């Protein structure tokens, strides 16, 4: 059985993230979406909220699990029997950063491969940071995040 991990902060999950999740779930027998808890970052959404949002939008994907983690990605992957780390790319800048991380992960665990997936071009401009900024100004989030999450995200910004 092939198992892959797709890690990220997902603060919040966007249509670009969901595009990668859906496509990777068709390639691997099991896809674990790893929601990173990073003490250096200050997410708007709690770990539980981020996990629940992804579970909501992937409920139709039987081979997708959503789990939170902290620490090293390669350790998380190994704990869950994943042989592959899936990384989504939007831009060349994404590639430069993710390439360095892939080399480090390979040095830490030579048996774990990193696979890069280009996002669909219609989502290439979307980032979680942009979604949060737009939500803060009460902007329209439709088309940027899954429809069932629009109100959940906007509610975070209501005073």
Image: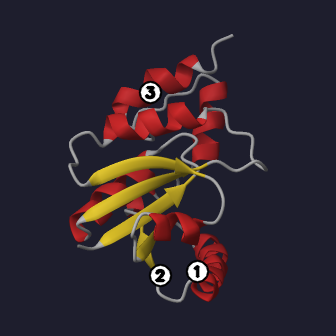
Residue 88 makes an appearance in the image:
no
Mark 1 surroundings within 10 Å by alpha-carbon count, few (fewer than 14), some (14 through 19), many (20 or more)? some
User: Distance between the Cα atoms at labels 1 and 3?
Assistant: 32 Å
Secondary structure found at label 2: loop
Q: Are marks 2 and 3 in contact (CB under 8 Å)?
A: no
- Asked if residue 83 can be seen in this view, the reply is yes
Q: Say left or right for 22 vs 82.
A: left
Q: In x, y percent, where is residue 2?
A: 27, 73
Q: Which mark is residue 102?
A: 1
- Residue at 23 percent across and 48 percent down: it is 61
Residue 148 to residue 159: above or below: below
Q: Using a 10 Å C-alpha cutoff, classify the residue at mark 2 as few (fewer than 14 neighbours), some (14 to 19) or many (20 or more).
A: many
Question: In this rendering, which labeled residue sits more in front, label 2 or label 3?
Answer: 2
Mark in front: 1 vs 2: 2
Q: Look at mark 3 in the image and give the residue it sits on.
A: 150
Measured as percent of width and height from the top left, residue 84 is found at: 41, 75
The residue that label 2 is drawn on is: 112
Q: CA distance from mark 1 to mark 2?
A: 10 Å
Considering depth in this image, is 61 or 143 the residue closer to the camera?
61
Q: Is residue 76 above or below residue 132?
A: below
Q: Is residue 93 left or right of residue 77?
A: right
Other-residue count near label 3 (Cα within 10 Å), few / some / many at <14 / 14–19 / ≥20: some
Residue at the front extreme of this rendering: 79
């Amino acid at each position: 059985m092939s198992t892959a991990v797709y890690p990220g902060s997902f603060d919040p999950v966007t249509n670009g993230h969901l595009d990668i999740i859906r496509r990777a779930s068709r390639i691997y027998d099991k896809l674990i979406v790893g929601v990173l808890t990073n003490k250096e970052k200050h997410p708007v959404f709690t770990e539980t909220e981020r996990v629940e949002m992804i579970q909501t939008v992937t409920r139709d994907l039987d081979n997708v699990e959503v789990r939170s983690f902290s620490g090293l990605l390669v350790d998380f992957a190994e704990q869950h029997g994943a042989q592959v780390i899936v990384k989504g790319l939007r831009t060349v800048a994404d590639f430069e950063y993710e390439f360095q991380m892939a080399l480090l992960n390979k040095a830490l665990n030579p048996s774990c491969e990193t696979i890069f997936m280009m996002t669909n071009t219609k989502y290439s401009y979307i980032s979680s940071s942009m979604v949060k900024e737009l939500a803060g100004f009460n902007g329209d989030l439709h088309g940027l995040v899954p429809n069932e999450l629009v109100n959940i995200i906007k509610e975070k910004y209501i005073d």
